[in-house]
Image (tube, helix red, strand yellow):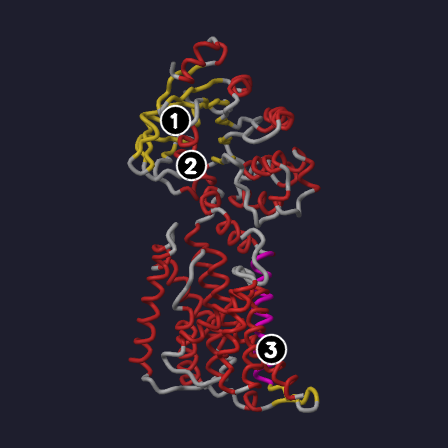
Amino acid sequence: MEWVNAIIQGILIGGLYALFAAGLSLIFGVMRLVNIAHGDFIVAAAYLAYVVVAATGLHPLVSLVIIVPLSAVAGYALQAGILNRTIGDDLLPPLLVTFGLSVILQNGMLELFTADSRKLDAGLLDIQNFNLLPGVNIGYMPLLMFVAAIIVIAGLQYIFYRTSLGRAFRAVSDDGEIAQIMGLDNRKIFAAAMALSFGVIAIAGVFLAVRANFDPFVGPSRLIFGFEAVIIGGLGNLWGTLVGGIILGVAQAIGAQIDPGWQLLAGHIAFLLVLAIKPRGLFPRIDG
Amino acid sequence: MSDTILSLTDIEAFYGDAQALHGVSLELAAGETLALIGSNGAGKTTLLKTICGLIERHIGAMLFDGANISGISPNKIPARGIALVPEGRRLFPSLSVEENLLLGGQVDRRGPWNLGAVYELFPVLRERQHQPSTSLSGGQQQMVAIGRALMANPKLLLLDELSLGLAPVIIKDIYALLPRIVAEGMSAILVEQDVTRALGFADRFICLQEGRVALEGEPKAFTREQISQAYFGT
């Protein structure tokens, strides 16, 4: 039963990894941009939540009502103001610019918030759980994270495949030149995609802040989990990203069950195995 | 010439340092169909792309419907009333047939063309509306590309290499439908490798040779030899 418990907890934590990864996957799918600062933006969203909760006394999850729109506006501005200038045939400029943003964000947060680690208190949600099976207790918070991940991915999937905005995302991703002469302003479409990605970043940031301690430098390690989930699932495939997150979470839980020191290693090994067997991930987009 | 819809004067266009057009001028009347012929690399596609704003480096005056369109961004082109059926069709592979058509129609110009009218013109597309556009045959894909352009209800339709890679019988079918497409005062510029077919359909033609106009006029006014001389530059 210990094993069943470990696997179930792993699945639930996989939801958080999928939240880390969904924004990355979305951006890569639309504009082939790899956002190296993605993890740092998640941490920045966590700090934003920290400030909003401290100022208003709202419950962290309620604070999402404020943080998600703020973050989305920031994402739109980032894309329209900076990243659109880096997009072109060459993949290197956006990598370099987002790498620079990552350094700036980490040091900026260090200046503003010091290196002390923080955590958001979600009250009873944090500690309550229910008994699923004998020996298997499910915490409300991990369950909520997992459900949030499914809702976020289902929502993104809906936007992508059922709305005119999603149609524009796919068209611009397929053939930017032709999309333009159909009347789409690629720059605005990219900015809208980044706004959406930053909405997800805000959700990921709040759950990060509630689940564990964070400090200005935890971003890159979150980014690794995000990248691994995206690549396991197949680039640009949103449900694949959820599966990737779950595989990562379960591998870590199994590793930790064998030996606590193996937790991270097991996740990375699972990632490498997938990469070795299916280099394009488990569910690559057919039109790749 | 009050009914001139498009007027280009001394257009020069460049890809990097290479000059592709050396002072091309043309006038197109409303409702007129112009065939643009010439060998590979003569600048036919470049001229269409320049009209659509896709060639950033160009000089010369471009007036469409009385307004300057030189230097405006390509995404403003469809709202002005110009639509392109690009060479090689270039459908959006991750969009279904219907989504491709809807994307063409999103500029929301009034006119006779909408989903229903396109499906009436190409009934086979209605049956395939939910399929990925890449699952269609070449001819059907060309129909989607034409439908997608028509959805913008353009005043000027630019058709680039309609027959490229298609079986002769399919080409014949598509050309048989063209008169219905360019009816109701729509102007068209037709770029075509198949010179006989293009000249048979168009009111007037322009033959480009290495980025310059080598010959222009009504197809009937010239002999085959004259046209082929302008075409090959011999």
Query: Which part of the image, by quadrant, shows the N terminus of chain A?
Result: bottom right
Res. B52 mark: 2
Asked if marks 2 and 3 fall on the same chain, the answer is no
- Check disc 3 and report the residue beneath it: A11
Q: What amino acid type is highlighted by mark number 1?
A: Ser
Q: Secondary structure at mark 1?
A: strand
Determine if the magenta segment contains residue A157: yes
Foreground: disc 2 or disc 3: 3
Q: CA distance from mark 2 to mark 3?
A: 51 Å
Asked if marks 3 and 1 fall on the same chain, the answer is no
Q: CA distance from mark 3 to mark 1?
A: 65 Å
Vertical placement of residue A248 versus A196, above or below: below
Q: Secondary structure at mark 2?
A: loop
Residue range highlighted in magenta: A140-161
Vertical placement of residue A58 versus A159, above or below: below
Q: What amino acid type is highlighted by mark number 2?
A: Cys
Which residue is at the front of the view, A247 or B200? A247
Asked if marks 2 and 1 fall on the same chain, the answer is yes
Res. A134 mark: none
The residue lying at 43 percent from left, 54 percent from top is A188
Chain letter of mark 1 equals: B
Vertical placement of residue A254 versus B29, above or below: below
- Check disc 1 and report the residue beneath it: B7
**Mark sitting earlier along the chain (2/1):** 1
Q: What amino acid type is highlighted by mark number 3?
A: Ile
